[in-house]
Amino acid sequence: MNQFLSGAEPNETMQAIMNRLSQEYGKPLAVCSDDEQHLVFEVLHKENGGETGDLSPAANDQLKKRLFDITKSIVYDNILI
């Protein structure tokens, strides 16, 4: 989670997490940090040259919860391998 907040270059695990979250949401998502304490999700609009669209605070909260759950699942699966 700290890697997402710090704006670190996405590694393989971070990409897998975002791919799964985007798939569940049904649209490609991007995540960034507004102040290195809060994650902010945006929808990527490929048809508009990669522009992003803001999501509501409620949608952001829901996505944060799913991000956390997906991260735990993927990290746990990686530990078992």
Image: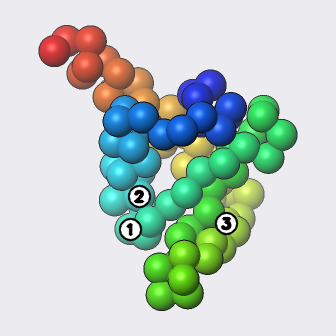
Q: Amino acid at mark 3?
A: Leu
Binning the other alpha carbons within 10 Å of mark 3 as few (below 14), some (14 to 19) or many (20 upward) gives some
| Residue drawn at the location 34% of the way across and 49% of the way down | 20
- Name the residue carrying label 3: 55
Residue annotated with mark 1:
26
Task: Give the Cα distance between marks 3 and 1.
Answer: 14 Å
* Front in this rendered view, residue 49 or 53: 49
Q: Residue furthest right?
A: 35
Whether residue 70 is visible here, answered yes or no, is no
Mark 2 lies on residue: 22
Q: Amino acid at mark 2?
A: Ser
Q: Are marks 2 and 1 in contact (CB under 8 Å)?
A: no
Residue found farthest to the left: 81
Say whether disc 3 or disc 2 marks the residue closer to the N-terminus.
Answer: 2
Which tag, 3 or 1, sits closer to the chain's start? 1
**Where residue 30 appears, x then y in whole percent?**
55, 57
**Direction bottom: furthest residue:** 47
Quarter location, residue 33: top right
Its colouring scheme is rainbow
Marker disc for residue 14: none
